[in-house]
Amino acid sequence: MNIGAKLLSEAEGIAGDLVEWRRYFHQFPELGMEEHMTANKIEGLLSSMPGMEVIKGFALSTCVMGRIGGDLPGGALAFRAETDAVEVREDTGLPFSSYDERVSHVQGHDAHMASLLGAAALLSDHRDSLEHPVVFIFQPADEGKGGSRYLLDAGLREKFGIEKMLCVHWVPYLPYGQVFTNKGGVTAFTNKLHIGITGQGGHGGTPYLTSDPLYLSAMIQITLQSILIREVSPQKTAVLSFGRIEAAEVYNVIAREVNMWGTLRTTDRDTNRFLKRRIEDVVRAMAHIAHLSASVEYTLDYGQVVNDDKLVSDIFESGVALIGSEGMCLLKEPLLVGEDFCYFAERIPSCMMFLGTGMEYGLYHARYDIPENLLPFASAWGAYLALAL
């Protein structure tokens, strides 16, 4: 039996553990920088694996890392999984739903952690076959807090001799069980923006005595969407969405202040820069005409994850040998997701891969779930790449 088939068989043998781990993480989600239960669980599991060196608290108190073959020559291959959850109320009805109504793993980080732990367990059993060190990074604060930068700034690459970085993101928009990646950019430039509008509020029965910031916020949304279809080439990809708008809390009061939060995503750096400037110009101009004041602030700016060409080639060569050309697929265009893995890719030759789950609900949907029968494959995939690359 070749090593790939052997790893797949062994991964099926620990499927029960993988499901148990995933369900624990799912039931007890924690926000970025607060992942204490999660970190303790990961630390305990890694510590039980023969040959595993466990490092807790590197750069961030809730960061947990494992290393196998630390005394082997050559540079290390590192895998990264995210540990934080998001502020979305889960509505799956699962018996292991989040215990915290405010927080959930509706972006698949529970599966990422469980499958990386599975890969670590498999490699622990095959540690005598390793030719280079392997580092498992369970990274806190992925969701909008840039946790990867803390690790890199603390000397992650240099301290652990990391020469290559890999990560796998589970994605419901792609066909079940297929692995996708490509050379170059695979995610979007992502910006979080806040628009604040202030002016004269008043009673809902006398709108003519107000400047009505809420009305202007609606006009701003419509106008900004027109920019995307009239000032950006249709050959470019750009998305602007507002997910949170706050105004007065009383039904018959016209607010004096409105706050809008949204996200701008593009797959082209020049388009991203153009739209950021254009949004600011348009919002301020519209506010001036309406006798209001407005501000635009960008509080998050994730770059694009750019895969290393040679690493992608090596992964395709190794991957096709295991799952065939139908299972190893080219990503036709970047996904419009923001990823702080971009910071790793800026400093270390990296490859971000996407595992298709083909589920009904998309990422961050209150009913998002993952197919647990993919956990063994994802674990074997990571362990296989560590041995094959």
Image (tube, rainbow, N blue to C red):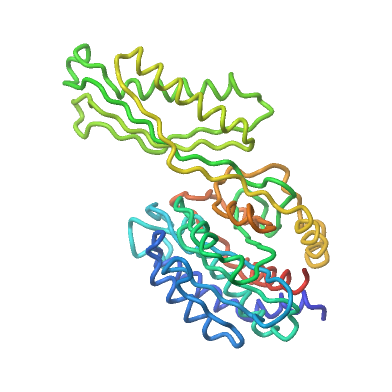
Q: Answer left or right for 338 relative to 280.
A: right
Is any atom of residue 327 visible in this view?
no
Query: Where 295 falls versus 47 (above or below)?
Result: above
Position in image of residue 214 (x %, y %): 30, 24
**Quadrant of the rendered image containing residue 348:** bottom right
**Quadrant of the rendered image containing residue 113:** bottom right
Which residue is drawn at the image coordinates 71% and 78% (left, top)? Answer: 9
Is any atom of residue 269 visible in this view?
yes
Query: Where 306 falls versus 386 (above or below)?
Result: above
Position in image of residue 281 (x %, y %): 46, 21
Total numbered circles: 0
Position in image of residue 65 (x %, y %): 53, 73
**Quadrant of the rendered image containing residue 379:** bottom right
Which residue is drawn at the image coordinates 54% and 45% (left, top)? Answer: 302
Camera-side residue of 148 and 74: 74
Which residue is drawn at the image coordinates 51% and 36% (left, top)? Answer: 264
Camera-side residue of 350 and 151: 151
Q: Answer left or right for 316 relative to 269.
A: right
Query: Where 328 falls versus 49 (above or below)?
Result: above
Position in image of residue 381 (x %, y %): 70, 68
The image quadrant where one finds the N terminus is: bottom right
The image quadrant where one finds the C terminus is: bottom right
Which residue is drawn at the image coordinates 63% and 74% (left, top)? Answer: 119
